[in-house]
Each structure stands twice: as structure tokens, then as C-alpha cells.
Image (cartoon, rainbow, N blue to C red):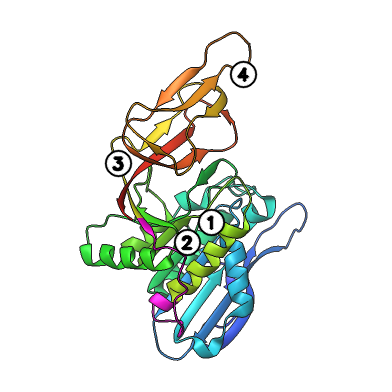
């Protein structure tokens, strides 16, 4: 089935274009309406292609800011190949400042490859899978923690069966030049954009650049620099990489005990902060009963050695929520 999304830009034309992916959407507010998803496209001669996306989850902002900055400042004369820029990939979720789409309640990063006959989120995923990804060799999907997570700023790649592809992804993640980079172990990789791009043989890099449902000057600066460096590394942007103050630190997740999940509801007291070194058995958090006083908190301890790479945000927590992730420093 043909996807009903249409583009207002011409992917066969060279130069810099700004436009929309027009998604038919009949609603109470607009019977014959469309969702207009912003997109920019830069093409100049022969060369590799890259697609850069932000707001895969709508409450993550470093990606949209960095990519809006790129769209406004890209120098077409320095481009060799093509760049697809989608700052707000899950546009309905971005407009609502929510993780998932308010239209169909779907998580964009769990429904790939999408469905041309599905709801809005599935339509977007299908269009990206069938129209945009085949144009590109390199894929950068910029995440941050959103409203419920906070991370040390890192770029990530995955362990792949194709070791040459994995090595290319690792090199691109390192080139992004976030303060940290690592091979990320996903809790559930099914339906992820990452998995779809990797299955198609692309060089894929993801990030987590902060969290708390906002952004900071520091995390935005990391995103802007990373986008620049990613395109330079891909051979698309004819420029020099932007070097951070110190080289990226390589981390390693301990698959058996990296993640710590809450087993109680209540008020979370963090006892170890982002970037803190911990040893197995160290106290990392307490959870207090949020409904009465005089009851001792439940203590949570690190299962392995490393540093706190991610934490729950904000301070109310429910059973089953992610609490912390611990990673080991491999190379400084």
C-alpha cells in the first residue's frame, strides 16, 4: 500500500530546501486537515547521505534545538552528498510536550518499520523506513532523557552481528564527541528506529544528552557540536571537526546488572549522583513511603562497580520504574 504522506520539497533537486511532510489527518478540529511535519533537505553533488532526527520522543529537546540550528546555518557549498534534517520526528508528541503521540498514544521508537495503512505515528515510521532511510548511509537520532530520565551526555552504538558495521557505528559515535560514548544495551530493542536502520545496513548513532524534560546550554552545545562532527566524519560536511575540552570517555554497560529498577512506590532519595563512582554494595538510593511517616525507607544498593550513568527523574517513583543505570569506565 502506498503511504499517503507527501513531501513539499523535491528530493531530486539540489540545493537547500525547507518544507513539510504533509500527513493527512481528519480530526474534530480539521475535517480535511493535515499534520505538517517540518523537514529540511540539503543536496550538493555526489556523496554519501545522512538523516538527522530529533524528538523521536516529544519531550526531548537537545535534538530539535541542534537540528533547527543546523537547518538555519548549513552552508550548502560545504556539503558533498545529501542531508535530511527532521528536527521534530514525532511532531504531534513534540507539540504536546509528551513522550508518545497524543493522537494514537504510540511510542515512535517502538513501532518501526511502521505501517502505510496505520495511524499517524505508524505512517511517519513507514515513510521514514521506505522513503528516507534508503536515501542515506548515516543515521543520527538525538535523544535525551525526557521528563522521566536524566543521563550523563553520551553517544551510543550497538553490538551487531556484522562487526564491520559495528566498528563503523562505534567510530561515528566516538566522532560525535559527547563527553561519553558506549555500546548501549537496550531493555527492549524490538520496533526501535535504531534496529530498523541497523537492519538496513546503516551506520547508526543514538544519544542521550540530558533529561528532565528540558535542556541546558551545556547539553545543547554538545548536540550542536555532535551534529557538526557527525557530518564531518561521514564525509558529507567539508570542514574540520570541533574538538571538546577533553576526549570522550568510553563506557561499558554490564549487561547482567547495569539497570536498577524500583520495587516500591514512593519518594526517591538519590544517594549517588550522575557521574559518581560506586562499588558493588554501595547505597545508591532510598525510597520512602509517600503515604505515612515513621516507616523506614527501603534502601537500594549497586549490583556492580562503575559510575552512575542515568537516573530516574523526578523524585516520585513507582514500582517498575527505572531508577539507575551503572556503567564501567573502559578508557579515559
Q: Earlier in the sequence, mark 4 or mark 2?
A: 2
Mark nearer the N terminus (3 vs 1)? 1
Residue identifier under label 4: 290
Q: Label 1 neighbourhood size at 10 Å, few (<14), some (14-19), many (20+)? A: many
Q: Are there few (<14), some (14-19), or many (20+) residues within 10 Å of tag 3? A: some
Depth check, mark 4 against mark 1: the one in front is 4
Residue in the foreground of this view, choosing between 254 and 271: 271
Quadrant in which the C terminus appears: bottom left
Residue at disc 4, secondary structure: loop
- Tag 4–tag 2 contact (CB < 8 Å): no
Within the image, what quadrant is residue 120 found in?
bottom right
Residue corresponding to mark 1: 56
**Mark 2 in CB contact with mark 1 (< 8 angstroms):** yes
Numbered disc in front, either 2 or 3: 3
Q: Secondary structure at mark 1?
A: loop
Count residues near mark 2 (Cα–Cα under 10 Å), then give few for <14, some for 14-19, many for 20+.
many
Q: x and y percent of residue 35 in the render? A: 67, 63
Give the answer, above or below, for where 122 lies relative to 324.
below
242 drawn magenta = yes
x 45%, y 91%: residue? 45
Can you tell which mark lies on residue 141? 2
* Range shown magenta: 232-249
Check disc 4: other Cα within 10 Å, few if <14, some if 14-19, many if 20+.
some
Amino acid at each position: 500500500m502506498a503511504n499517503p504522506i507527501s513531501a513539499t520539497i523535491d528530493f531530486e533537486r539540489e540545493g537547500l530546501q525547507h518544507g513539510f511532510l504533509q500527513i493527512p489527518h481528519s480530526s474534530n478540529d480539521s475535517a480535511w486537515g493535515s499534520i505538517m511535519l517540518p523537514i529540511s533537505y540539503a543536496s550538493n553533488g555526489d556523496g554519501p547521505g545522512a538523516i538527522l532526527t530529533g524528538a523521536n520522543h516529544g519531550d526531548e529537546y537537545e535534538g530539535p534545538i541542534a537540528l533547527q540550528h543546523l537547518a538555519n546555518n548549513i552552508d550548502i557549498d560545504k556539503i558533498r552528498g545529501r542531508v535530511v534534517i527532521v528536527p521534530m520526528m514525532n511532531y504531534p508528541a513534540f507539540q504536546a510536550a509528551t513522550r508518545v503521540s497524543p493522537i494514537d498514544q504510540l511510542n515512535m521508537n517502538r513501532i518501526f518499520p511502521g505501517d502505510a495503512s496505520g495511524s499517524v505515528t505508524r505512517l511517519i515510521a513507514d515513510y521514514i523506513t521506505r522513503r528516507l532511510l534508503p536515501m542515506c548511509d548515516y543515521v543520527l537520532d538525538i535523544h535525551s532523557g525526557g521528563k522521566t530520565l536524566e543521563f550523563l551526555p553520551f553517544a551510543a552504538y550497538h553490538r551487531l552481528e556484522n562487526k564491520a558495521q559495528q566498528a563503523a557505528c562505534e567510530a561515528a559515535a566516538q566522532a560525535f564527541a559527547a563527553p561519553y560514548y558506549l555500546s548501549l544495551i537496550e531493555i527492549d530493542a524490538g520496533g526501535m528506529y535504531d534496529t530498523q536502520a541497523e537492519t538496513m545496513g546503516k551506520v547508526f548513532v543514538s544519544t542521550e544528552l540530558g533529561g528532565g524534560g528540558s535542556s541546558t546550554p551545556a547539553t545543547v552545545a554538545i548536540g550542536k557540536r555532535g551534529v557538526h562532527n557527525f557530518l564531518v566524519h561521514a564525509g558529507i560536511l567539508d570542514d574540520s571537526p570541533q574538538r571538546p575540552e577533553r576526549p570522550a570517555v568510553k563506557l561499558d554497560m554490564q549487561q547482567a546488572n547495569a539497570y536498577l529498577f524500583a520495587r516500591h512506590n514512593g519518594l526517591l532519595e538519590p544517594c549517588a549522583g550522575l557521574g559518581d563512582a560506586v562499588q558493588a554494595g554501595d547505597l545508591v538510593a532510598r525510597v520512602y513511603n509517600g503515604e505515612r511517616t515513621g516507616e523506614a525507607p527501603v534502601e537500594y544498593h549497586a549490583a556492580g562497580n562503575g559510575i552512575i550513568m542515568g537516573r530516574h527523574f523526578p523524585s516520585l517513583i513507582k514500582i517498575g520504574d527505572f531508577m539507575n543505570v551503572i556503567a564501567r569506565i573502559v578508557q579515559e
